[in-house]
Image (spheres, rainbow, N blue to C red):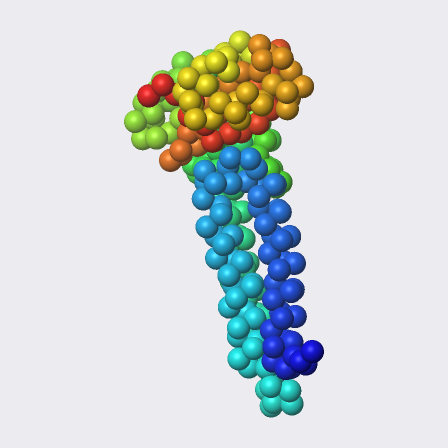
Amino acid sequence: MPTLSPRLRAAIIHAALGAVLTLLVGLLVRFAWYPDALFEALGASGPLAILAAAFLIAGPAATFAVFVPGKRGLVFDLVAIGLLTATFAAYVLWTLFETRPAYVVFVKDRFELVRAGDFPESEIARAASSPYLDLPLLGPRYAAARMPVDRAERDRLIFAAPTGLDLHHMPQHYMKYDESRAEVARRAEPLRKLRALNPGETTLIDSLPAAAGRTEDLVGFLPMRAGERDLTVIVDRSNGNPIRLLALRPWEF
Protein backbone atom coordinates (compact mmCIF):
# COMPACT_ATOMS: atom_id res chain seq x y z
CA MET A 1 0.00 0.00 0.00
CA PRO A 2 1.57 3.31 -1.08
CA THR A 3 2.56 5.77 1.65
CA LEU A 4 0.80 9.12 1.61
CA SER A 5 2.97 12.11 0.98
CA PRO A 6 3.27 14.65 3.82
CA ARG A 7 1.35 17.19 1.74
CA LEU A 8 -1.54 14.86 1.11
CA ARG A 9 -1.59 13.68 4.71
CA ALA A 10 -1.75 17.28 5.95
CA ALA A 11 -4.56 18.10 3.51
CA ILE A 12 -6.53 15.02 4.61
CA ILE A 13 -6.15 15.95 8.28
CA HIS A 14 -7.30 19.49 7.47
CA ALA A 15 -10.32 18.09 5.57
CA ALA A 16 -11.19 15.75 8.45
CA LEU A 17 -11.16 18.62 10.94
CA GLY A 18 -13.22 20.66 8.48
CA ALA A 19 -15.76 17.83 8.20
CA VAL A 20 -16.22 17.77 11.98
CA LEU A 21 -16.69 21.55 12.10
CA THR A 22 -19.09 21.45 9.15
CA LEU A 23 -21.17 18.78 10.90
CA LEU A 24 -21.31 20.70 14.18
CA VAL A 25 -22.19 24.00 12.51
CA GLY A 26 -24.73 22.30 10.27
CA LEU A 27 -26.50 20.70 13.23
CA LEU A 28 -26.66 24.05 15.05
CA VAL A 29 -28.06 25.93 12.06
CA ARG A 30 -30.39 23.19 10.80
CA PHE A 31 -31.96 22.08 14.07
CA ALA A 32 -31.62 25.10 16.38
CA TRP A 33 -31.57 28.35 14.43
CA TYR A 34 -33.56 27.28 11.34
CA PRO A 35 -35.69 24.23 12.29
CA ASP A 36 -38.12 22.38 10.04
CA ALA A 37 -39.18 24.22 6.88
CA LEU A 38 -37.40 27.42 7.89
CA PHE A 39 -34.05 25.97 6.79
CA GLU A 40 -34.89 25.87 3.09
CA ALA A 41 -37.54 28.59 3.08
CA LEU A 42 -35.16 31.20 4.48
CA GLY A 43 -32.19 30.16 2.36
CA ALA A 44 -29.92 28.93 5.15
CA SER A 45 -28.65 26.07 3.00
CA GLY A 46 -26.79 28.43 0.66
CA PRO A 47 -24.44 30.01 3.24
CA LEU A 48 -23.89 26.60 4.82
CA ALA A 49 -22.84 25.15 1.45
CA ILE A 50 -20.34 27.98 1.01
CA LEU A 51 -19.01 27.37 4.51
CA ALA A 52 -18.66 23.65 3.81
CA ALA A 53 -16.72 24.42 0.63
CA ALA A 54 -14.31 26.57 2.64
CA PHE A 55 -13.83 23.87 5.31
CA LEU A 56 -13.66 20.87 2.99
CA ILE A 57 -12.15 22.18 -0.25
CA ALA A 58 -10.51 25.60 -0.10
CA GLY A 59 -8.78 25.13 3.26
CA PRO A 60 -7.37 21.64 2.57
CA ALA A 61 -6.31 22.73 -0.93
CA ALA A 62 -4.40 25.67 0.54
CA THR A 63 -2.75 23.38 3.10
CA PHE A 64 -1.75 20.98 0.34
CA ALA A 65 -0.24 23.87 -1.64
CA VAL A 66 1.95 25.26 1.16
CA PHE A 67 2.83 22.17 3.19
CA VAL A 68 6.47 21.28 2.66
CA PRO A 69 8.14 19.72 5.72
CA GLY A 70 10.97 21.86 6.98
CA LYS A 71 10.01 24.82 4.78
CA ARG A 72 10.86 28.18 6.27
CA GLY A 73 7.68 30.03 7.23
CA LEU A 74 5.49 26.90 7.13
CA VAL A 75 3.99 27.61 10.55
CA PHE A 76 3.15 31.15 9.48
CA ASP A 77 1.47 29.85 6.31
CA LEU A 78 -0.62 27.31 8.23
CA VAL A 79 -1.64 29.86 10.85
CA ALA A 80 -2.62 32.31 8.12
CA ILE A 81 -4.77 29.65 6.41
CA GLY A 82 -6.43 28.83 9.74
CA LEU A 83 -7.12 32.49 10.54
CA LEU A 84 -8.55 33.20 7.09
CA THR A 85 -10.81 30.15 7.27
CA ALA A 86 -11.92 31.03 10.81
CA THR A 87 -12.63 34.64 9.83
CA PHE A 88 -14.73 33.58 6.86
CA ALA A 89 -16.59 30.99 8.96
CA ALA A 90 -17.27 33.59 11.66
CA TYR A 91 -18.69 35.98 9.07
CA VAL A 92 -21.03 33.34 7.62
CA LEU A 93 -22.16 32.22 11.07
CA TRP A 94 -22.72 35.79 12.24
CA THR A 95 -24.83 36.49 9.14
CA LEU A 96 -26.96 33.41 9.79
CA PHE A 97 -27.25 34.31 13.47
CA GLU A 98 -28.25 37.92 12.83
CA THR A 99 -31.00 36.89 10.40
CA ARG A 100 -32.19 33.82 12.33
CA PRO A 101 -35.89 33.32 13.08
CA ALA A 102 -36.59 34.77 16.52
CA TYR A 103 -40.36 34.55 17.01
CA VAL A 104 -43.32 32.79 15.46
CA VAL A 105 -46.10 35.18 16.42
CA PHE A 106 -49.81 34.42 16.35
CA VAL A 107 -51.74 37.44 15.08
CA LYS A 108 -55.53 37.25 14.82
CA ASP A 109 -55.88 34.29 12.40
CA ARG A 110 -52.35 33.46 11.25
CA PHE A 111 -48.74 33.27 12.31
CA GLU A 112 -46.04 35.78 11.40
CA LEU A 113 -42.33 35.03 11.34
CA VAL A 114 -40.12 37.62 13.03
CA ARG A 115 -36.40 37.42 12.39
CA ALA A 116 -33.64 38.85 14.53
CA GLY A 117 -33.28 42.44 13.40
CA ASP A 118 -36.92 42.81 12.31
CA PHE A 119 -37.86 45.12 15.17
CA PRO A 120 -37.53 48.76 13.99
CA GLU A 121 -35.53 51.07 16.20
CA SER A 122 -38.64 53.17 16.83
CA GLU A 123 -40.48 50.15 18.25
CA ILE A 124 -37.48 49.01 20.29
CA ALA A 125 -37.52 52.40 22.01
CA ARG A 126 -41.24 52.08 22.73
CA ALA A 127 -40.79 48.53 24.06
CA ALA A 128 -37.78 49.23 26.26
CA SER A 129 -39.18 47.15 29.13
CA SER A 130 -40.50 44.27 27.01
CA PRO A 131 -38.94 40.88 27.78
CA TYR A 132 -39.35 39.99 24.11
CA LEU A 133 -36.44 42.23 23.18
CA ASP A 134 -34.21 39.52 24.65
CA LEU A 135 -34.17 37.39 21.52
CA PRO A 136 -33.91 33.61 21.91
CA LEU A 137 -30.51 32.20 21.04
CA LEU A 138 -31.44 28.63 20.13
CA GLY A 139 -34.45 28.44 17.88
CA PRO A 140 -37.54 30.60 17.41
CA ARG A 141 -39.96 31.07 20.28
CA TYR A 142 -43.74 31.12 19.96
CA ALA A 143 -45.58 34.24 21.09
CA ALA A 144 -48.78 36.11 20.33
CA ALA A 145 -49.54 39.75 19.60
CA ARG A 146 -52.66 41.57 20.78
CA MET A 147 -54.18 44.65 19.19
CA PRO A 148 -53.58 47.66 21.44
CA VAL A 149 -56.50 48.93 23.47
CA ASP A 150 -55.36 52.53 23.37
CA ARG A 151 -57.10 54.39 20.51
CA ALA A 152 -54.08 56.50 19.61
CA GLU A 153 -51.87 53.42 19.42
CA ARG A 154 -54.41 51.60 17.24
CA ASP A 155 -54.51 54.58 14.88
CA ARG A 156 -50.72 54.66 14.77
CA LEU A 157 -50.69 51.01 13.80
CA ILE A 158 -53.26 51.54 11.05
CA PHE A 159 -51.44 54.50 9.54
CA ALA A 160 -48.08 52.68 9.73
CA ALA A 161 -49.36 49.62 7.84
CA PRO A 162 -48.61 51.04 4.34
CA THR A 163 -44.95 51.42 5.36
CA GLY A 164 -44.69 47.70 6.14
CA LEU A 165 -44.87 48.12 9.90
CA ASP A 166 -47.33 45.67 11.42
CA LEU A 167 -48.39 44.39 14.82
CA HIS A 168 -45.79 41.62 14.90
CA HIS A 169 -43.04 44.26 14.61
CA MET A 170 -44.13 45.77 17.94
CA PRO A 171 -42.83 43.67 20.85
CA GLN A 172 -44.58 45.95 23.35
CA HIS A 173 -47.83 44.29 22.25
CA TYR A 174 -46.59 40.70 22.58
CA MET A 175 -47.99 38.31 25.14
CA LYS A 176 -47.30 34.72 26.13
CA TYR A 177 -48.32 32.15 23.57
CA ASP A 178 -50.28 30.29 26.26
CA GLU A 179 -52.78 33.17 26.31
CA SER A 180 -53.62 32.57 22.65
CA ARG A 181 -53.91 28.78 22.61
CA ALA A 182 -57.69 28.73 22.70
CA GLU A 183 -57.91 31.16 19.79
CA VAL A 184 -55.32 29.19 17.80
CA ALA A 185 -57.32 26.00 18.32
CA ARG A 186 -60.52 27.76 17.29
CA ARG A 187 -58.98 29.26 14.14
CA ALA A 188 -57.16 26.12 12.98
CA GLU A 189 -58.32 24.75 9.64
CA PRO A 190 -58.90 21.00 9.05
CA LEU A 191 -56.34 18.85 7.23
CA ARG A 192 -58.78 18.16 4.40
CA LYS A 193 -58.39 21.78 3.35
CA LEU A 194 -54.60 21.46 3.46
CA ARG A 195 -54.85 18.42 1.17
CA ALA A 196 -56.95 20.39 -1.29
CA LEU A 197 -54.36 23.17 -1.31
CA ASN A 198 -51.46 20.70 -1.71
CA PRO A 199 -52.68 17.77 -3.84
CA GLY A 200 -49.12 16.53 -4.38
CA GLU A 201 -48.40 16.25 -0.64
CA THR A 202 -51.18 13.94 0.51
CA THR A 203 -48.77 11.28 1.82
CA LEU A 204 -47.04 13.80 4.07
CA ILE A 205 -50.32 15.31 5.26
CA ASP A 206 -51.84 11.87 5.89
CA SER A 207 -48.90 11.01 8.15
CA LEU A 208 -49.30 14.04 10.42
CA PRO A 209 -51.99 12.74 12.84
CA ALA A 210 -50.14 9.49 13.59
CA ALA A 211 -46.83 11.33 14.00
CA ALA A 212 -48.49 13.68 16.50
CA GLY A 213 -50.30 10.87 18.32
CA ARG A 214 -53.65 12.45 17.50
CA THR A 215 -56.74 11.58 15.49
CA GLU A 216 -57.18 13.59 12.29
CA ASP A 217 -59.96 15.76 13.68
CA LEU A 218 -57.54 17.00 16.37
CA VAL A 219 -54.84 18.11 13.91
CA GLY A 220 -55.22 21.31 11.92
CA PHE A 221 -53.19 24.11 10.41
CA LEU A 222 -52.80 27.86 10.15
CA PRO A 223 -50.83 29.89 7.59
CA MET A 224 -47.59 31.62 8.43
CA ARG A 225 -46.17 34.57 6.55
CA ALA A 226 -42.41 34.20 6.37
CA GLY A 227 -41.28 36.86 3.93
CA GLU A 228 -40.79 35.68 0.38
CA ARG A 229 -42.44 32.33 1.06
CA ASP A 230 -45.50 31.47 3.11
CA LEU A 231 -45.41 28.34 5.26
CA THR A 232 -47.86 26.23 7.23
CA VAL A 233 -47.98 25.69 10.99
CA ILE A 234 -49.49 22.36 12.00
CA VAL A 235 -51.31 22.69 15.33
CA ASP A 236 -53.20 20.57 17.82
CA ARG A 237 -56.83 21.62 17.56
CA SER A 238 -57.56 20.49 21.12
CA ASN A 239 -55.12 22.83 22.85
CA GLY A 240 -53.46 25.08 20.24
CA ASN A 241 -50.03 23.49 20.62
CA PRO A 242 -47.78 23.98 17.57
CA ILE A 243 -46.69 20.63 16.14
CA ARG A 244 -44.58 21.34 13.03
CA LEU A 245 -43.64 23.97 10.49
CA LEU A 246 -44.02 22.74 6.93
CA ALA A 247 -43.33 24.17 3.48
CA LEU A 248 -46.92 23.64 2.34
CA ARG A 249 -49.24 26.09 0.62
CA PRO A 250 -51.53 27.57 3.30
CA TRP A 251 -53.67 29.90 1.18
CA GLU A 252 -56.21 29.57 -1.60
CA PHE A 253 -54.59 32.42 -3.53
Between 185 and 19, which is closer to the camera in this rendering?
A: 19
Furthest-front residue in view? 1
- At 61% from the left and 89% from the top, the residue drawn is 71
Picture coordinates of residue 17 (x, y %)? 65, 64
- At 53% from the left and 26% from the top, the residue drawn is 204
- The answer to whether residue 19 shows anywhere in this view is yes
- At 53% from the left and 73% from the top, the residue drawn is 61
Picture coordinates of residue 116 (x, y %)? 50, 40
Question: For this view, does 43 lie left or right of residue 6?
Answer: left
Picture coordinates of residue 4 (x, y %)? 65, 79
Between 144 and 152, which is closer to the camera in this rendering?
A: 144
Question: For this view, does 229 lie left or right of residue 190?
Answer: left
218 w.r.t. 121: above or below: above
Picture coordinates of residue 48 (x, y %)? 51, 52
- The answer to whether residue 135 shows anywhere in this view is no
Question: For this view, does 159 lie left or right of residue 171?
Answer: left
- At 45% from the left and 44% from the top, the residue drawn is 43
